[in-house]
Image (cartoon, rainbow, N blue to C red):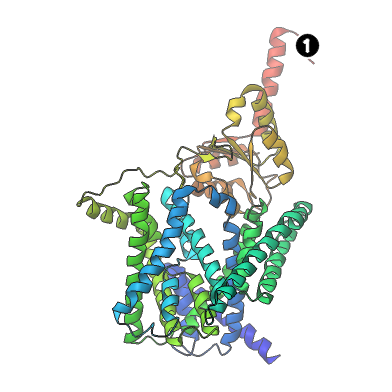
Amino acid sequence: MHGEESLLQDIGLSIIFATVLSHIARVLKQPLILGYIIGGAMLGKEMGFELVTNEASIELISEIGLILLLFIIGLEINLAELAKMGKAMFTLGILQFTLSVAFVYSVFPFFGLSIGSEKFDLLYIAVALSLSSTLIVVKLLQDKVEINTLSGKLTVGVLVFQDIWAILFMGVQPNLNNPEILKILTSVGIIVLLIAFSFSVSRYVLAKLYKACASSPELILLTSIMWCFLVCGIAGEAGLSKEMGALVAGMSIAAFPYGADVISKLIGIRDFFVTLFFVALGLKVPLPSLEVIGLSAAIIALMLFVRMITIAPVIIKLNKGVRNGFLTALNLAQISEFSLVILALGAGFEHITPKLQAVILTSTIIASVLSTYIIMFNHNIAATLERLLARVGITDQTEESGSADPSGQSGHGGHGGDGMVRDIIVLGYFRIARAFVEYLEDLSPSLIKRIIIADYNPAFKEELTNKGFQWAYADLAHPDSLSHIGLHDASMVICTISDSFLKGTNNNRLLSTLSKLAPNAKIILTSDEPGEAKKLVADGAQKVIIPGVITGEFLYEYISRGMRNNEREV
């Protein structure tokens, strides 16, 4: 009972300190992550008031948060989409990690730093500095509405490949002490079997479960979390890490349309645990000595240099543009949470020294805060670097295009699986949308090729795809699910559902979300009240449909025409 009270007290203090410090950070216009970490440091015994006495409990909760985080990352790794990225993205994803590991492994000993002297220290340093933070990058790029620019897509593509490299390294970690080729191949074989098992169950079992509970969001959420922890348990029993199991679990359902819904419903849970994860990092931050700060500064400088020389030149060589090369490198200028997981596992295997773990942890925290500002001002920094490079005769050969993709295709709007440009997005397949579809079939078949219809009910998918439309999953009550349907490149976004039928949101909130996700689109909404319609137009909607007014106009015209013609119509 005492342990339970201690755990509750420690979690409560962690949330209180993280909240207070993050509010202070917000007022000072600093990243919220800084508030979480400082809150943890103030609670700990190294730099704070020694208020948290049960750090193991906080570590346990943060580990759960990390597992959920990696599960969500896995949901973002759609192997089918990865295969569509083209040779350019594959080249970048492979060269970034391999060149980075090789460079750090070769150059770091010449720095003469007092870490990296043990057998595996150097390998772990090289791997840790070659991985970037998906958590920080994706959140900041989404906030800046840059996730769908060419540099944003290149950035996310590299992160996906980094996750895959991390999975492979975690698979061979247990055998580093005895690196026999047979044991390493056995580990790789176990990973392959785990992936094959997970994808098979997803295809033949989860697909049916999701279809059966499509109308119950809570059951979809619970089923997904159950699947996450089930695969984590299987991975642990097979000698792999639970974190790897979480990634594989996410990847195995990423091909389903429910993946976006799972992400949107896990956001709140994830953010709670991620907060504790960063608080736990703060608890472990040692009292900063000049030596640790100096070592961390050197490691961060090396990491920034490595990002520049392994990413920008490759992107420039692939004719994706000088500006995009620098932007992608700047976006990835941090050390991954994955690196901390790998180091923690390495410490458990006694591969690395505690000093190395402490220095990389301090470097990760400092780099996380620093990279927030780097991404905030990435275009200014990239423009400066571009001008410097232009002085030696290297200039941009491609134009920055928010609609370009890493595979080299460009154009306005998203591309469907058939390669057609689809830049008109209809949100919700309800009464007006269904009538609209019928009119299009009869009067404008060519327009069908430009339209994506987004709805939460997969029962309409087959019907719409047979008619030539592209169907996408979207839950209007969860804005995060909307970011996956290509809104950034849309020329027009239409919602034909009024507040009377919208559940969990309204057109006013929807307009605010769409204005951020689709900054260049004309937004058309639906309202039952003329007064509300005027407000929506004033707030930025291009046009607002009022069904009652349209019906009244039709009746007036119908009756007036009949009276003028003095004829009776049935």
Name the spot of residue 184 as percent of width and height, x first.
Answer: 57, 73
Give left or right: position of 374 versus 255.
Answer: left
Please tell me which residue lies in front, 493 or 119.
Answer: 119
Q: Secondary structure at mark 1?
A: loop
Amino acid type at mark 1: Arg
| Residue at (43% x, 74% y) in the render | 364
Q: Is residue 467 visible?
A: yes
As drawn, the residue found furthest toward the top would be 566
| Residue 446 picture location, percent across and down | 58, 26
For the residue pair 452 and 418, the one nearer the viewer reads as 418
Q: Is residue 528 left or right of residue 289?
A: right
Left or right? Give the position of 237 relative to 278.
right
Q: In percent of the image, x 40 and y 43: which residue is there?
A: 401
Q: Nearer the viewer, residue 114 or 155?
A: 114
Q: Is residue 238 above or below residue 555?
A: below
Quarter of the image with the N terminus in it: bottom right
The spot of residue 94 in percent (x, y) is: 45, 59
- Residue 30 appears in the picture as rendered: no
x, y percent for residue 395: 26, 47
